[in-house]
Image: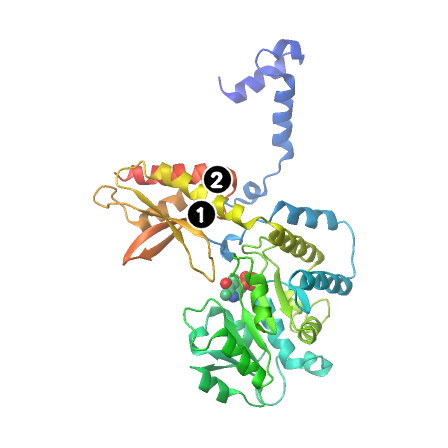
Amino acid sequence: MKRRDIIKGLSLLPLSGGIIGGIFTSKTVFSESKQKRDRRDLFEELGVTKVINAGVTMTFLSGSLMMPEVLDAINSTSHDFANMFDLQDKVGAKIAEMLQCEDAMVTSGAACAMVLGTAAAITGKDPEKIKLIPNLPGPRPEVIMLKSHRYLFDQAITTTGATIIEVAGPDEMDKAFNSNTVLALFYNAAGSSSVSHEEFIALCKKHNIPSFIDAAADVPPVENLFKYQKMGFDLVTFSGGKMIRGPQSAGLLFGRKDLIEAAKLNHSPHEAPIGRPMKVNKEEMFGMYAALKSYLERNHQQEWDGWLERIEKIKKKVTQVESVQGETYINPGPANAFPTLYVTWDQEIVKMTANDAQAALQKGTPSIVTNVTTKDGSKVLSVGVVLLRPDQIDIVARRVREVLKHAI
Ligand SMILES: *Cc1c(COP(=O)(O)O)cnc(C)c1O
């Protein structure tokens, strides 16, 4: 009998536990149907597919899932108003204390932190400049970057009206500083750097120009949250919604107090400045604070071991398919420095490519997003585990096995 029929049948019976107790307890029947009514599924309501993220933190997949304590912070603070100037100051002071630096603020992501940090370097606390940016009179402000550090996100720098001056090495960098220079930006996860972190900072200090490092995706390890301000960078940014698992629409900008103060003047809740379209509300601020606190207090070794266990679990299942092999790959970082499972197979036996498997997993039910990467010149299926909910580990293992087995 179908479940629907049972329920239909039950409605004809007198609803006493005594009669239906042999099949269900009345409690089960009622709580199940009540749950169905109460649990509004907005994914379903809007026709949006839920996705299992067996990849890395990606903004197009909504980043990461917030920690329960972050959701608590958001929910428990959403019923009261707050003065946003006061909240940003207090949250910033607390974050600065946690990160052992002078000052900090919550931004709407690392890209926003780059806009605000650059704007701060351009305007200082000058109200006239804050009003005019990005249309200041005179020559364009200049931001120095290494040639090998140019990347997609540096558009956040030119959003302020600044222009990027590329340099190839330490000598060129030394000569690039002039009266229009406002900032130098270091991209931490760049493939190569002809100038080391230390040399970069030293050159900036020599010319009395602030140095800024973008380390958006560079935890774990947790130590990185302290490393760059200790080295001497004047400004540091991390995304809030990557492995710190705060709100996806939050980020951290921290470092020198005068620069953070200037960055705040360029941001919401002020009415008109360049940062106004990058508003951060109190939920993100409380949420970001709770996320950072939780991240710093976490047992990182235990978390890491848990990831390795997940990999072993999935590996054990998928290697039951003929010729399929699994290998634990530890990304050396600085970005996404965590373990991932690489899955390979003999394509004479399992007749599909890594891209075919990736597409099948994505099209399947549930939809699972994995990555394809190149190892020793051939493509491998990369199955990420760090963003899976505990109940999704078996689902991913089963689906990868099914997809590969199906191609035999
Ligand atoms: C993700 C990322 C950004 C953008 O960060 P958001 O928090 O999404 O704004 C900037 N730089 C790097 C290196 C990143 O990885």
Above or below, 21 relative to 247:
above
The amino acid type found where label 1 is placed reads Ala
Rounded to the nearest angstrom, the CA distance separating label 2 from label 1 is: 9 Å
Drawn side of residue 312 relative to residue 242, left or right = left
Q: Which residue is disc 1 drawn over?
A: 54
Above or below, 334 relative to 391:
below
Drawn side of residue 232 relative to residue 55, left or right = right
Say if disc 2 is inside 8 Å of ligand 1: no
Drawn side of residue 317 relative to residue 252, left or right = left
**Tally of marks:** 2
Residue 187 rendering spot, x and y as whole percentages? 49, 71
Mark toward the start of the polypeptide (2 vs 1): 1
Instruction: Name which residue lies at 55% across and 75% down.
Output: 157
Q: State the SS at label 1.
A: loop
**Can the viewer see residue 195 in this picture?**
yes
Furthest toward the top, the residue is: 19
Q: Which residue is disc 2 drawn over?
A: 392
The amino acid type found where label 2 is placed reads Gln
Instruction: Name which residue lies at 63% across and 12% down.
Output: 13
Give the position of the C terminus as an image quadrant.
top left
Q: Of 273 and 163, which appears nearest the observer? A: 163
Instruction: Name which residue lies at 64% across and 62% down.
Output: 99
Instruction: Name which residue lies at 69% across and 49% down.
Output: 73
Q: Residues within 10 Å of mark 1 (few under 14, many from 20)?
A: many
